[in-house]
Amino acid sequence: MRRVYRRRRLTVVGVGVGVVTVVAWVAAGPTTGGGSPPAAAAVPSIEAGLEPWQLPSPVSRESVSPAAGGLTVLGGLTTSGASTAAVTTISTSGVARAQPPLRAAVHDAATAVLQGATLVLGGGSPTTVATVQTAAPGGARAVVGSLPAPRSDAVGVTIGSTAYVVGGYTGSAYLPQVLATTDGRTFHTVATLPVAVRYPAVAAAGGQLYVLGGEVPATTGGATAATADVQAIDPATGAASVVAVLPRPLYGASAFTLDGTVYVAGGETPDGTTRTEIDAFVPSTRKVLFAGLLPQAVAFAGATTLGTGAAATGYLVGGEVARQTGADQAGVATGTLRTVLALRPSRYGGPAGTSTAGAPFRGRLLVADRGNDRLLVLTPARETTWVYPGPGRPAPAGGFYFPDDAFFFDKGHGIISNQEDNNTIVEIGYPSGRVLWDVGHPRVPGSGPGYYHQPDDAYVLANGLVTVADAGNNVVKLIARSGAVVARIGNGVDAHVPGVSIAYPNGDTPLPDGNLLISEVNGAWVSEYTPTGHLVWTTHVPGVAYPSDPQQLGPDRYLMTDYNPAAEGRILEFARSGQVVWRYDVATGDGMLRKPSLAERLPDGLVMVNDDYRDRLVVIDPTTNMIVWQYGITDVPGTAPGLLSIPDGFDLLEPGGVTPTHRATG
């Protein structure tokens, strides 16, 4: 759609701290033991959102506990690999305040809350220690006791007035003993794990402790090994057993109890792949169900839960990414993170255990992958099902170059795409890939009959005509099947003179009543015109530098991106008066957009946007301003599965051939 702008001219429910990793979904989530959950007992899937704010600095393997109005981050590893004693409180709106440090720098410690104070139990410093430190809300820091033996890579969980330490490592041996304390000074063993693990995910539900996955002793020299076992512990009786199996072995995941269901998010597999999958473990049925995807792969993060019951929210804070691959990929590629992820029961998508669990859209997603000169069709699970050009689907004469937009038509049986810098428009059969129709002269711009100059946003209208913003010629054209231009808006002069001329139009969205919503780059105007060129209304949204592809949401509500403002890109919802009623405008960090060219509201109220120059498509929840789904690795262009390069357009095809964002033209 665009290029770089130029003028042509807080209660702990279940805490998994220690090491946290994020898991990615390759296929529809399995259930252990076969079968599906009972229809009457639907388990909520998860919306996982990337907070629009970030940590002050990258950190991993830290401890996290609830704080008044937010989170407390304690210790951890810095990007240099050194342990830190830093303590920071962060509000749920992202306000960070440094607090007095711990008495000793530590990472990979267990964390629990007793009598209002946070206990930091053991950890690495850099060798494994047994020290128990306390961090009271008033700022008091002290060493209050010692574990029975040095222990790191463990998880702390509080049930009532008792804190439990589960899993861990002495530096040479895996520890099966589950410890309990009521004061952080004295400890006793309440159970023995059948499978000794370090870096497990642990949560409490119904008075029981559940231990999900974890690293286990390697059976071959030097190799990392992990288990897929789900272990249940009754701290009252000491009973412990393996009760279920995760879809795959993993370690470093985090577990959260949300309204009675235990969710495990993230994890690293023994081959070192950091994943994005979320699974639900249902204590009543002991089933493991696929529950959604994270928009950022993460491992070795701090984790905690704020709130209780249906209002509980799990948090993944910071962490690491070792490597990513294939459809599992999302977010920052590698390294130590500053990101904060919030997990809550999803209000959209299917329930846990279904292929659409937590999915932000249904059906097929068409992507104009401009930098790779191709079109892709994706599933909500980030799987690629179709590529054009491809085997048996050759490019049209003159090549397939610079696909700026692509939209379904004929109930999904065809795709129209304009190649902006190829100066052509082509219709392609879907899924056959056969060229159905094309106009323009490849690589030859012009203003005469049959010529185009940077054609933008080509749609097939219900009457069979094609509309396109012929940007370089300062005109919007309606084109017949013969290739003849049967109507035009604008006289070719680069000037905003309503009803006479338009200035570098880059959007011409068809409206249900047959009119067109036109954006003009030069002067930053948005206008509605009839197909015969009569102006209905026009507005300049204050502060907008480069309006891109406005979409109608309602009688007086519109959505568009500002492609090239002074501080990267943003999304705005506005009225005809120019009043902005909602905006997504994250100035820094992983939530920041860079030259986004198209935003559309999905049927469930979420907003999808192609973030052109961060090489990704993202979905944003406008109620939280969080990114809740991503395809592409942030700032990493590529052609491999899971990667994009300057994605510049998209369209959605729902079951039944419905194009929900432009029903009148689908």
Image: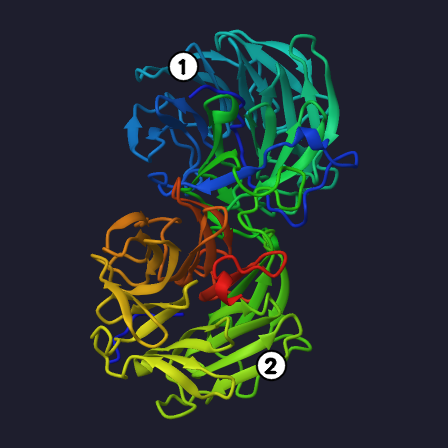
Name the one closer to the observer, 156 or 630. 630
Label of residue 435 in the image: 2
Q: Quadrant of residue 233?
A: top right
Residue farthest to the bottom?
448
Instruction: Give the camera-side residue of 558 and 389.
Output: 558
Q: Residue at x 67, y 42 (%)?
A: 354
Q: Where is 35 relative to 188, above or below?
A: below
At x 52%, y 87%, the residue is 398
* Residue 496 relative to residue 247: left or right: left
Image point 51% across, 68% down: which residue? Answer: 407
Query: Residue 382, percent across and down?
Result: 59, 54
- Residue closer to the observer: 412 or 232: 412
Q: How many marks?
A: 2
* Quarter assignment of residue 427: bottom right
Q: Is residue 120 left or right of residue 254?
A: left
Q: Position of residue 400 (x, y in %)?
A: 53, 80
Q: Which residue is mark 1?
A: 117
